[in-house]
Image: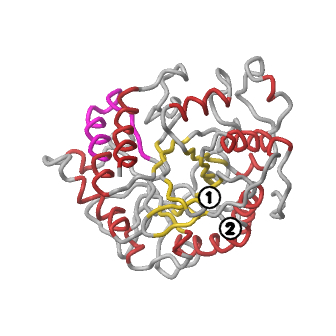
């Protein structure tokens, strides 16, 4: 495991340093006192066996960031895994296209990516995605990766990128599910207690950033049983056992998906998609009604290339976000190589999937008009 002590950024992360102050108030995110909205995408790769953002076998980091920004996105959620922080040898880079990356290890590449995003004024959310760089664990720890390891890695990231003005926060753990509970009193499974412990450490290491907390899956109490929940998508227990962390530092970040990912029974009901608003209200929308910032960290689908219901589902979800004023989001994904959702980009890693993009643009335009 890496040291939790603060480290100086590598050469890739030199330049003017800003001590940013991200806060939450009145259901909005503020950067140094100015209200912002996060219109983001997930760009994955650092969380897996290649230990680097995907697509560098055909393009450059700069090209992709420029295209994101040109489309109106202003934020990126970067999943990572612990081994990436150890500085291992990356894969999946074409050095004839990216000669400047020759000789860089995985941590160098993460440094370089966040620096380039920062230089282009793209907000960055670092996401602790998978403890073994393969599977999404049910809990924040495993038999081979302790809670102490987890918190050390979170504080390492909080410290390392603390001088970058567009590093806004950390998504503490991707998609708690299965054994994860909320508010049961069992410290070994209660995600809410783990969030509180991790948040204290992260905010002590870097008081300027935000903590993003996902939901869980099912729960034995304070949780509806008539409709199944997505991994990380159940925030219902927050109503009974609210997170005891500073409210000005908390963003709730549920994940919600459609029939391309799993054919939930409610997609097959006769009143679909009219039934969806009530389900979303119960599972996470109520929090937006009660003054929390709700920023979905993942949602997406093939948009017509898979289950034909997905187009209706994605359109309805965007309508719902517009109605609820949920303007902060991270779409899954920028990458086209997500097997059950595809991406904003087509398989050539350049062409934009227009249907997906235009649907998201409706939300971005509506939020910018407010």
Q: Which mark is residue 115?
A: none
**Residue at image location 60% in from the left, 52% down from the top:** 125
Whether residue 230 sits left or right of residue 244 in the image: it is left
Question: Residue at 41% across / 41% down in the picture?
Answer: 300
Real-space CA distance between mark 1 and mark 2, rounded to the nearest whole angstrom? 8 Å
Q: Disc 1, disc 2: CB below 8 Å?
A: yes
Q: Which residue is mark 1?
A: 170
The answer to whether residue 190 is above or below residue 340 is below
Marks 1 and 2, the one that precedes in the sequence: 1
Q: Is residue 305 magenta?
A: yes
Corner quadrant of residue 207: bottom right
In the picture, the disc for residue 202 is 2
Where residue 49 sits in the image (x, y, percent)?
69, 38
Quick check: 358 above or below 216? above
The residues colored magenta run 299-317
Image spot of residue 208 (x, y percent): 66, 65
Are there few (<14), some (14-19), or many (20+) residues within 10 Å of tag 2?
Answer: many
| Residue in the picture at 66% in, 48% down | 80
Quarter of the image where the N terminus is located: bottom right
For image coordinates 58% across by 59% down, the residue present is 31
Q: Position of residue 62 (x, y in %)?
A: 67, 30
Q: Is residue 56 visible?
A: yes
Callout 1: SS:
strand
């Amino acid at each position: 495991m890496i040291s939790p002590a603060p480290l100086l950024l590598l050469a890739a992360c030199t330049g003017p340093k800003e001590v940013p102050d991200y806060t939450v108030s009145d259901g909005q995110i503020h950067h140094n006192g100015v209200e912002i909205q996060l219109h983001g995408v997930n760009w994955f790769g650092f969380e897996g066996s290649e230990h680097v953002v995907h697509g560098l076998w055909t393009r450059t980091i700069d090209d992709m960031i420029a295209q994101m920004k040109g489309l109106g996105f202003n934020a990126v959620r970067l999943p990572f895994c612990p081994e990436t922080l150890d500085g291992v040898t990356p894969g999946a880079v074409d050095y004839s296209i990216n000669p400047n990356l020759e000789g860089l290890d995985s941590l160098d590449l993460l440094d370089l990516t966040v620096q380039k995003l920062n230089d282009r004024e793209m907000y960055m959310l670092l996401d602790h995605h998978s403890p073994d760089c393969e599977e999404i664990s049910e809990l924040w720890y495993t038999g081979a990766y302790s809670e102490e390891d987890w918190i050390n890695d979170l504080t390492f990231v909080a410290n390392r990128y603390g001088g970058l003005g567009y590093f806004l926060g950390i998504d503490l753990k991707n998609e708690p599910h299965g054994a994860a509970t909320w508010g049961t009193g069992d410290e070994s499974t209660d995600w809410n207690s783990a969030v509180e412990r991790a948040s204290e450490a992260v905010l002590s290491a870097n008081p300027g950033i935000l903590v993003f907390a996902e939901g869980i899956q099912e729960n034995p109490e304070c949780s509806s049983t008539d409709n199944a929940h997505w991994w990380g998508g159940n925030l219902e227990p927050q109503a009974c056992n609210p997170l005891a962390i500073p409210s000005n530092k908390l963003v709730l970040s549920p994940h919600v998906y459609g029939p391309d990912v799993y054919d939930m029974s409610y997609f097959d009901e006769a009143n679909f998609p009219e039934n969806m608003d009530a389900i979303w209200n119960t599972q996470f929308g109520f929090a937006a009604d009660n003054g929390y910032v709700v920023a979905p960290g993942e949602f997406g689908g093939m948009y017509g290339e898979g289950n034909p219901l997905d187009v209706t589902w994605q359109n309805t979800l965007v309508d719902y976000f517009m109605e609820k004023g949920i303007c902060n989001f991270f779409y899954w994904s920028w990458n086209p190589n997500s097997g059950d959702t595809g991406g904003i980009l087509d398989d050539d890693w350049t062409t934009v999937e227009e249907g997906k993009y235009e649907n998201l643009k409706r939300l971005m335009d509506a939020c910018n008009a407010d």
